[in-house]
Image (cartoon, helix red, strand yellow):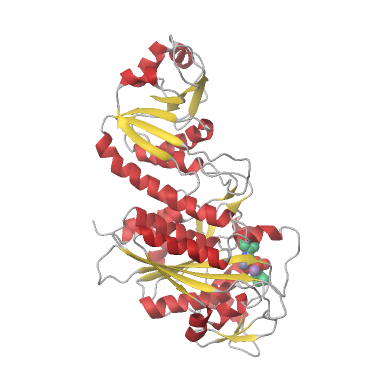
Amino acid sequence: MGNLTVARIIDFDVKTISDVTGRLAVLVTPEGELSPAARSANRLCKGALARMVEGDGLSKAKAGDVVSLPWPAGLDIKALDVVVLPKRPSQSELRSAGAKLAARAGEAALTLMAGSLIKVEELALGFALRAYSFDAHKTDAEAHQPELIIAHKKPTEVQGAVDTAMALAEGVHMTRDLVSEPANVLTTTEFANRLVEMQELGLEVEVLDEDALEELGMRTLLCVGQGSDSPSKVVVMQWKGGAASDAPLALVGKGVVFDTGGISLKPAAGMEDMTMDMGGAGTVAGTMRALALRKAKANVVGLVGLVENMPSGNATRPGDVVKTMKGDTVEVINTDAEGRLVLCDVMWYAQERFKPTAMIDLATLTGAIIIGLGHENAGVFSNDDAFCNSFLAAASAEAEGAWRMPLGSAYDKLLKSNVADMKNIGGRPAGSITAAQYLQRFVQDGTPWIHLDIAGVASVASGTEFSPKGATGWGVLALSRLVQDNYEAE
Ligand code: BES
Ligand code: MN
Ligand code: ZN
């Protein structure tokens, strides 16, 4: 993954401070109490740190903030980063501090004198998430690997947790890379190839080509891709970290590598943003990567439907009637409501083949969810309160915005068609809910299911605390936590 942070853990020894180059970070409590390493650094820089703390240098700083002293005399560093953290910092304070350190570090290596700081892996995760950039197509960008050196009193005990944090960051970075790639690079074939590469990590990966999908009867998925020169594909990724007898959790992702709208063509303004219409598949891929890298003790299967929605002489027309793998027929009123046509077949296949214990689909499905929730929360739809609550708890623990939306038969009526079993759109009112109602028709009785409409959160116009503007990787952390808290044996 492009510029994943290299995190190195070394033995904590204050005597090494004078040898540090790049940037040096030391800990100070919000009350202004210097850690042992901060005291050593203060001596070396002739009391500059104490003068700052005793002056009003930290007056506006709260837990999780960083205040920097550039080019301090007496030290061989670019800056001394003063990390404001209480003795028992929270996860969010640690991640926040890590993100702020990364934003300042730039090209410089950062040495953090962590001492016996608890949960230092959370700081490392915040650092790695914020250090991301997507420079694959900038010819003058020099490849730069962010470097975080953590000096800790218990290096061997900290190592495992930091490795896990870096596994999560790598998953998030993969999602962001996929979402950021333009559609001429990330074709359906290239996407599938990148997933096949994950076999190296112990995932079983299969690619179903158009002949196989035709054979399975995935006509609605195929009808979306039939106007494109890029072949439609379904990729199945299996992580078998649990007991052989445990039914897997299924993750299903919408992977529209570009959404022109098809014959129901989108307007030109902003159409370039539809390179991110594979965000659901991107999150499924990044989550599978994180689970494999951290060797999750659970069975999880990830399925993505990869298609390109293009207009052509061979494209699906408004009014066409198409049969789903389930056997129901759909009148395609609007070819721009293509995500649900892809998902319904992949969801059905996932249930028929894997009999999953539960299923979550992720999709940049509707513009309407952006109108409703903006870029702060994904829309969460579910047929099962307990399952839904466990996801909401995981998302909240990872500070990934998620808000439950309603389902109901009154909304479902809006999908009635005169010529087929259903239409693929329900009109403008409650556009995100009718999309979810459509999907629910493809959830089998007894399968706990969550639909995540991530159109607003997969990519954002201005940067967030943990990501530069563009792809966020939303959902990888929440899904990994959901798996850890609910499906992994102790
Ligand atoms: N991919 C879009 C939804 C979308 C919009 C994602 C903006 C990210 C940002 C989806 O395929 C779509 O076009 N939905 C239509 C549905 C409508 C035709 C019922 C929409 O939201 O306008
Ligand atoms: Mn569309
Ligand atoms: Zn779309």
Q: Is residue 445 visible?
A: no
List x then y, in percent, for residue 245. Answer: 25, 72
Question: In this view, which residue lies farthest toward the right?
Answer: 268
Q: Image height check: is 261 above or below 16?
A: below
List x then y, in percent, for residue 365. Answer: 58, 66
Q: Image height check: is 482 above or below 55?
A: below
Image position of 385 (left or right of 266): left
Image-quarter location of ligand 1: bottom right
Q: Image height check: is 176 above or below 112?
A: below
Instruction: Please report the residue visible at 64 percent of the width from the left and 49 percent of the height from the top.
Output: 461
Instruction: Please report the residue visible at 43 percent of the width from the left and 27 percent of the height from the top.
Output: 84
Image position of 58 (left or right of 111): right
In the foreground, 98 or 155: 155
Instruction: Please report the residue visible at 76 percent of the width from the left and 62 percent of the height from the top.
Output: 268
Which image quarter is the C terminus in? bottom left
List x then y, in percent, for residue 412. Answer: 57, 78
How many circles with numbers are drawn on the protein?
A: 0
In the foreground, 433 or 244: 244
Could you say which quadrant of the image residue 370 lies in? bottom right
Instruction: Please report the residue visible at 36 percent of the width from the left and 76 percent of the height from the top.
Output: 354
List x then y, in percent, for residue 320. Answer: 67, 85
Question: In this view, which residue lies farthest toward the top?
Answer: 46
Q: Is residue 111 visible?
A: yes
In the foreground, 239 or 31: 239
In the foreground, 463 or 255: 255
